[in-house]
Image (cartoon, rainbow, N blue to C red):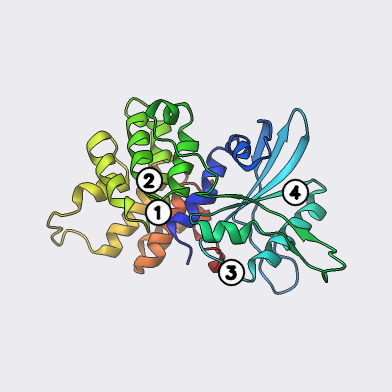
Amino acid sequence: MVSPPHEAMHRIFQHDPGLFSRVSRFLGVDMPPPVNAAVLPTDLTETAPVERRVDTLLRLETAEQGAFLLAVEAQGKKHPDKPSAWAYYAAHLWTKYKLPTALLVVCQDYATAKWAQQPVSSGPPQMPTLTLQPLVAGPHNMPVITDPEEARADLVLASLAAITHATEPVINGILKALSTALRDTPEAITDPIIEFTAQGLAKSPAKQLWRNLVAVDLSFYKSYIAEEIREEGREQGVELGHAERGAQDVLLVLERRGLDISEAVRSRITECHDPEILSHWLALAVTVPKAEDIFEASDPDGA
């Protein structure tokens, strides 16, 4: 089961594909902004009985370099099988689309980031047939944005800064700056930023600070996160069971995003009584292009 931070770390690039060009300068690459961008299918499964699913896949095009693919992977911890999986993604995508392929790994701690950015070769030392060298974004190189004006200039980058520094002492300043920057921002822009940030902080102590800031500074905000904040600490009563409430939250997010919800999708959501599954669907509901996509399979090793 993937976690909300895992979803936020890669889906934020789906929300704003141009984010990569702004992030790249912190990675020593300085990629120009795309003139075209498209989100591509993430399923890389072949006919053999093994599933390979990249977290986010974008087709970007710049005026200077033309088209290329960007695979974005969210990595929450070290995993010995990941380098070979990433090498498969890069080789398969290069073969399938006949386009140069870049790999970006997003991490939330120094140890995982240091591990992920080490080059790995598939051949013996004297014959490094294929060498994997991903770009890595994490607390070691993402900007610390504590100035509200700087946060307002690039809200998506500020949200990613909060996500990648979720467990660092600087997180309080980043969240306060982001919250201040969002005060006079239209809800259509504010809503996904609040959700991505909330997802990315789900396992960190800073989660409560963000909840408080949203409740106080952004009192107009009506998403499921804000409602959860306002209800927390109050007597819940017996108005709704946890499962029914979770199903309604999933439907609410899909409806607020204007997605078409078929009767089959609505029935499957309302008939689910597993809180973990509903929580997973809720995380996906924030960014999926179609309501049916919340039921997609996920790679449990990525979290």
Q: Where does residue 190 sit, x and y in percent of width and height?
A: 39, 34
Q: Earlier in the sequence, mark 1 or mark 3?
A: 3
Structural distance between the alpha carbons of marks 2 and 4? 32 Å
Q: Earlier in the sequence, mark 2 or mark 4?
A: 4
Asked if labels 4 and 1 touch by Cβ distance under 8 angstroms, the answer is no
Q: Amino acid at mark 3?
A: His
> Could you tell me how many numbered marks the image carries?
4
Q: Amino acid at mark 4?
A: Thr
Classify residue 91 as left or right of residue 257. right
Q: Where does residue 221 sit, x and y in percent of width and height?
A: 29, 37
For label 3, the residue is: 79
For label 2, the residue is: 171
Q: Amino acid at mark 2?
A: Ile
Look at 24% across and 41% down and name the residue there. 215
Structural distance between the alpha carbons of marks 3 and 2? 26 Å
Closer to the eye: label 1 or 3: 1
Q: Earlier in the sequence, mark 3 or mark 4?
A: 3
Q: Secondary structure at mark 1?
A: loop
